[in-house]
Every structure is written in structure tokens, then in C-alpha cells.
Amino acid sequence: MSDHYRINVRFDMSKEREKTAVEYLGKLSEKSSGTRNRFIVNAIIEAIGREESDGPFSLEDIRAMFREELKSVSFTASPPPSAPSKLDTDLTEEEKEENVENVLAALDMFG
């Protein structure tokens, strides 16, 4: 029994991604022998690792992440807008006259 496992891969050169992959693998083989094999093995192992570690995030995972990130952030509240210390309740003579007319007009509704 051989210690080697052989697999054939076919690339469709009319598909841009596959063509790019072929060109990249071709450049690897020019550099040194065995590089393509090493590259493919590393890529497969990395893909397996990502697949195993990429689980769905739960709401609690997201909350924990935010809590962790916000530990180093300081928050300050802006002071509430200050109210005027004294409201101006003095009426002008014109406003006083207008109020008297409005009150008399309201009383006329009852008479």
C-alpha cells in the first residue's frame, strides 16, 4: 500500500476564477518543485479550520463582545440646558389691553 494519495483536478479556463487559480499554481511550480502541493494542502487545512471555527453568533456572543469593547470607553453626559433663572412675566401695555379684550369677549359668550 502506498503512502501517497493522488487526486486529479480539472480547471475550466473559460471561468475567470479558475483561470486565475491555474495561473497562480503555474507560477508556484516555476519557483520550486512541491510548492503547488504544499500550497494546496495548506489551503485545504486553513479552509477546514475556518469551517470548524465559524459557528453562528448568538445574541449573547454579540452582547459579550460589545461589553468587552465598551470596557475601555468612557462616556460623559452633557449638562442639561440651563433654564433662565427668572421668567419675564411682565406684560406690555398693549398685551394687557389685549388680555382685557379677550376676557370680555369670552364673558360675552355667557350673556
Image (cartoon, helix red, strand yellow):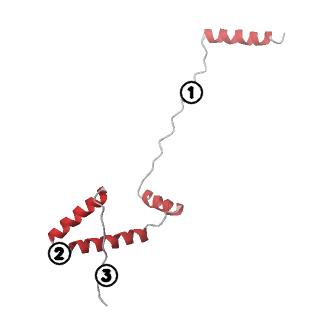
Q: Earlier in the sequence, mark 2 or mark 1?
A: 2
| Residue situated in front as seen by the camera: 63 or 81 | 63
Q: Quadrant of residue 30?
A: bottom left
- Element class at badge 3: loop
Measured along the vertical axis of the image, is residue 95 above or below residue 12?
A: above
**Numbered disc in front, either 2 or 1:** 2
Q: Are marks 2 and 1 in contact (CB under 8 Å)?
A: no
**Residues at marks 1 and 3, CA–CA distance in whole angstroms:** 90 Å
Q: Residue at x 23, y 71 (%)?
A: 36
The amino acid sitting under disc 1 is: Lys
| Residue situated in front as seen by the camera: 91 or 54 | 54
The amino acid sitting under disc 2 is: Ser
Q: Which label was assigned to residue 86?
A: 1
Q: Which label was assigned to residue 5?
A: 3
| Residue situated in front as seen by the camera: 11 or 64 | 11
- Element class at badge 1: loop
Q: Residue furthest bottom?
A: 1
**Residues at marks 2 and 1, CA–CA distance in whole angstroms:** 89 Å
Image location of residue 39, percent across then percent down? 26, 71
| Residue situated in front as seen by the camera: 93 or 1 | 1
Q: Which label was assigned to residue 16?
A: none
The amino acid sitting under disc 3 is: Tyr
Image location of residue 47, percent across then percent down? 36, 69
Q: Is residue 81 left or right of residue 89?
A: left
Measured along the vertical axis of the image, is residue 62 above or below residue 51?
A: above
Image location of residue 8, percent across then percent down? 30, 73
Q: How many residues crowd mark 1 within 10 Å: few (<14), some (14–19), many (20+)?
A: few
Q: Residue at x 49, y 60 (%)?
A: 62
Q: Residue at x 17, y 75 (%)?
A: 33
Q: Residue at x 44, y 56 (%)?
A: 70
Q: Which label was assigned to residue 33?
A: 2
Q: Are marks 1 and 3 in contact (CB under 8 Å)?
A: no
